């Protein structure tokens, strides 16, 4: 339903974007909607994939391409779809994930993988060199005290708390299959991959899923349980790219083939996660050493980063909120005036609002791709409810004598609306706009999940790297922006409303 | 000028107006009086077409109100409700000028008419730029009257225009209103529940009870020849406090 509803709006949206002179294509490079001549790398939302993504950027840049990186976009399926759709040109993937999960219906094997990919217009490099398979980990002290050595040993302790990353919970090669294969009695909880480590360390979780190249295995003294039934397959890292990728860029990617042992990768992950070195720097340093590439990572200062994020966030909030005001107030008027359409309008915006914001964002991606456009549209839909409902309530709650006086004057319906009803409902309408603004600015941080950038970007990175500084780099400006926008609306209210209508 | 024939208005089980015949003569002040809930306001709303009768017919100048163009009809009838019904977001001047502006009057014509009316209703001109919440009750009613008179309508419908005012201010405004009605020769329908006011304004008075007219005529007739014990009681009830003091 939401989809059918959203599509006509998208055309309107682009129209308004043009009118406002804020062409989405004219974004700066970091999160840019790439121009045709440039390439885009995507990466999943975990550190190793982000580092590999930056390396793909570097090797192609070294060959003269203009390359953007939409980092930490989401899970495998999300990136695969983006690649097939052409939103991105390259992303790091793992053979096991392709065979077990993404191409499971095609029933392919490792030997036929390249052919299967070709049917989707996708090609892959030779393996980068390391196998990053899933593994189940427990704290070393717990493993010792309960004598846990294999995954099967978990059967003896049904009381153990299992927490698995959300992707692992759902994948056919993840928890459901594992539970069957080992006959495990526990129920597992879904948690964010990075929060899982913290849960394990603080004791709220006893066993979590890991990637075998995770830096934390050593850092937190985690024991990897033996997969003695050979449940987990092989997950060789490769780079996937579209077959229409220019040959020179492809050659660049091929430079990375066979370059990484498991130890190398664990070391690079540790540089980023434990030493808190930014991924672009980790990637560039390694390439300089290993390939003599002379790649230089751009390391913008904190102020520069906040500046770019602010610009992105303002585009998201400004466009979506502007559009919600432009459409929400007329819809609210319609709801108040039409007995036939009115209840329908209220119901539809109400239902949209009950869709979790994450789901709404995700639903926008198939028709619109990743980037700012789907995020603007989702935020717009999300901001409608307070504006529509407050306009409706404001108009419906006008005092009877005033409505009667206006009625008895003999004004036209339009004149009555413009000269009397809307001014009288203005405070309620503006309150709706304020609520929408606050919701919008907060929700816009989720836009980073679909490549829209904004303050959500450092928050995502910060959560992933357990870096409070980065999390604050997103949350503090978002709070400041909220305060500024509310102040602006307050000033607007003061200038718009006559003195008799202010509190 | 306004004729009601066999008019009833029902709200569900409530009978607000019950089979009323009433003629409002041009140039006269007709007073509708009666206890609260007797149907006075409902009668006014029937006259300017804010509501339509459940049964019977209302005509204005011979044309059934239902068939008349509502806007044109209302431009010929000024309407003032008890609390004035002034719009709180507009100054006194803008309230009064609202309808003229909607009709596209040029500024100088609007200003001239406002000046004329300010003088007529004796509003201190500096009050024009105040918002209703900044005006006294009496001043608010004067502005309401200006708004109702802006297009120089044939008829004024006033629903308890003095009901919310202090006695002193009320007496003042009563005097002013009566001279305005006289000078302008308007057809006025005035609603009140106050006997004194009815007698003061009314060329013709109709006393209502439970949606019906129980007696009509001059105030003198009502006082000296009440048609029923109810009329006598209604009049007596308002006289009693003063008589008590006279003893
Ligand atoms: N819109 C309405 N809906 C329901 N009942 C109404 C409505 N308007 C008036 N009434 C009822 O009709 C009766 C007459 O009301 P009204 O004309 O306002 O009386 P008055 O003005 O004499 O006090 C009252 O009982 C009142 O409750
Ligand atoms: Mg009344």
Image (cartoon, rainbow, N blue to C red):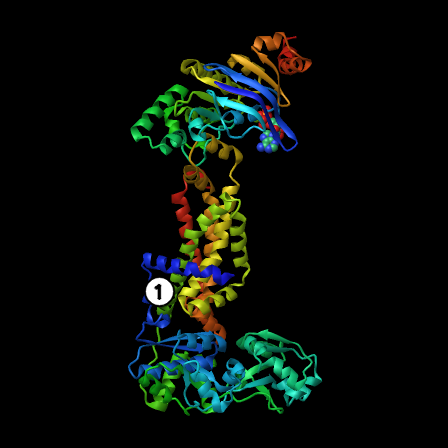
Count neighbours of disc 1 (C-alpha within 10 A) and say few if under 14, some if 14 to 19, many if 20 or more. some
- Residue at x 45%, y 24% (from the top left corner): B77
Residue B107 at x, y percent in the picture: 31, 30
Image quadrant where residue A271 sits? bottom left
Q: Image height check: is A21 above or below A183?
A: above
Q: Image height check: is A119 above or below A447?
A: below
The kind of secondary structure element at disc 1 is helix
Residue A171 at x, y percent in the picture: 56, 79
Is any atom of residue A480 visible in this view?
Answer: no
Image quadrant where residue A297 sits? bottom left
Residue B175 at x, y percent in the picture: 47, 15
Could you tell me which chain the residue with mark 1 belongs to? Answer: A
Split into quadrants, the picture shows ligand 1 in the one at top right
In the picture, measured across the screen, residue A199 lies left or right of residue B92, that is: right
- Mark 1 residue's CB less than 8 Å from ligand 1: no
Image quadrant where residue A196 sits? bottom right
Residue A3 at x, y percent in the picture: 48, 63
Is any atom of residue A367 visible in this view?
Answer: yes
In the picture, measured across the screen, residue A113 lies left or right of residue B225, that is: left
- Residue at x 40%, y 29% (from the top left corner): B96
- Residue at x 51%, y 22% (from the top left corner): B162
Q: Of residues B32 and B60, which is closer to you in this image?
A: B60
Q: Image height check: is A15 above or below A148?
A: above
Query: Count of labels shown?
Result: 1
For mark 1, what is the residue? A24
- Residue at x 67%, y 13% (from the top left corner): B228
């Amino acid at each position: 339903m939401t989809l059918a509803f959203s599509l006509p709006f998208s055309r309107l949206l682009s129209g308004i974007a043009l009118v406002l002179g804020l062409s989405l294509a004219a974004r700066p490079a970091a999160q840019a909607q790439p121009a045709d001549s440039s390439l885009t790398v995507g990466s999943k939302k975990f550190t190793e994939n982000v580092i590999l993504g930056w390396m793909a950027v570097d090797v192609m840049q070294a060959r003269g391409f203009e390359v953007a990186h939409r980092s930490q976009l989401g899970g495998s399926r999300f990136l695969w779809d983006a690649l097939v759709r052409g939103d991105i040109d390259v992303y790091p993937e793992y053979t096991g994930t392709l065979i077990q999960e993404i191409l499971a219906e095609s029933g392919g094997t490792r030997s036929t993988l390249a052919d299967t990919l070709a049917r989707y217009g996708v090609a892959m490099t030779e393996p980068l060199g390391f196998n990053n398979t899933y593994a189940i980990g427990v704290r070393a002290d717990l493993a010792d005290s309960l004598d846990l050595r294999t995954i099967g040993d978990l059967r003896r302790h049904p009381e153990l708390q299992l927490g698995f990353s959300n992707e692992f919970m759902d994948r056919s090669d993840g928890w459901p299959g594992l539970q069957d294969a080992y006959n495990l009695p526990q129920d597992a909880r879904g948690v964010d991959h990075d929060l899982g480590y913290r849960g394990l360390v603080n004791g709220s979780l006893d066993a979590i899923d890991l990637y075998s190249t995770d830096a934390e295995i050593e850092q937190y003294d985690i024991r990897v349980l033996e997969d003695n039934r050979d449940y987990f397959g092989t997950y060789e890292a490769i780079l996937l790219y579209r077959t229409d990728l220019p040959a020179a860029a492809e050659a660049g990617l091929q430079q990375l083939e066979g370059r990484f042992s498991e130890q190398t990768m664990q070391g690079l992950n540790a540089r980023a996660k434990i030493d808190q070195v930014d991924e672009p720097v980790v990637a560039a340093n390694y390439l300089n050493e290993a390939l003599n590439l002379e790649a230089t990572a751009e390391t913008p200062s904190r102020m520069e980063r906040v500046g770019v994020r602010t610009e992105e966030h303002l585009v998201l909030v400004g466009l979506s909120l502007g559009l919600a005001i432009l459409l929400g107030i007329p819809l609210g008027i319609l709801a108040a005036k039409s007995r036939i359409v009115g209840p329908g309008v209220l119901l539809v915006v109400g239902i949209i609002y009950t869709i979790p914001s994450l789901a709404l964002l995700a639903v926008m991606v198939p028709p619109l791709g990743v980037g700012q456009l789907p995020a603007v549209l989702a935020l717009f839909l999300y901001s409608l409810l307070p504006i529509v409902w407050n306009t409706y309530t404001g108009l419906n709650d006008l005092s009877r004598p005033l409505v009667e006086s206006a009625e008895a004057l003999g004004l036209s319906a339009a004149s009555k609306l413009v000269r009397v009803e809307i001014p009288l409902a203005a405070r309620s309408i503006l309150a709706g706009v304020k609520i929408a603004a606050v919701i919008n600015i907060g929700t816009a941080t989720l836009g980073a999940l679909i490549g829209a950038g904004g303050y959500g970007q450092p928050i995502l990175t910060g959560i992933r790297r357990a870096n409070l500084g980065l999390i604050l780099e997103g949350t503090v400006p978002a709070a400041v922006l909220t305060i500024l926008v509310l102040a602006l609306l307050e000033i607007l209210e003061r200038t718009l409303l006559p003195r008799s209508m202010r509190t | 000028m306004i004729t009601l024939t066999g008019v009833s208005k029902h709200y569900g089980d409530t009978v607000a107006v019950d089979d009323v015949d009433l003629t409002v003569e041009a140039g006269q002040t007709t007073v509708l009086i009666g206890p609260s809930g007797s149907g006075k306001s409902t009668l006014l709303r029937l006259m300017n077409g804010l509501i339509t009768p459940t049964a019977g017919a209302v005509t204005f100048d011979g044309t059934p109100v239902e068939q008349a163009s509502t806007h044109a009809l209302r431009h010929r009838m000024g309407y003032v409700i008890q609390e004035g019904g002034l719009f709180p977001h507009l100054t006194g001047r803008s309230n009064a000028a609202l309808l003229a502006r909607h009709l596209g009057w040029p500024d100088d014509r609007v200003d001239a008419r406002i000046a004329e009316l300010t003088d007529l209703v004796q509003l201190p001109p500096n009050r024009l730029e105040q918002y209703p919440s900044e005006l006294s009750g009496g001043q608010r009613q004067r502005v309401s009257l200006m708004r109702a008179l802006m297009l120089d309508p044939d008829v004024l419908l006033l629903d308890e225009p003095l009901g919310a005012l202090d006695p002193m201010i009320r007496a003042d405004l009563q005097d002013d209103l009566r001279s305005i009605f006289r000078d302008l020769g308007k057809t006025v329908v005035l609603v009140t529940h106050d006997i004194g006011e009815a007698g003061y304004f009314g060329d013709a008075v109709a006393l209502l009870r439970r949606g019906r007219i129980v007696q009509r005529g001059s105030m003198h007739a009502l006082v000296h020849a009440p048609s029923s014990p109810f009329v006598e009681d209604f009049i007596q009830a308002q006289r009693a406090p003063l008589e008590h003091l006279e003893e």
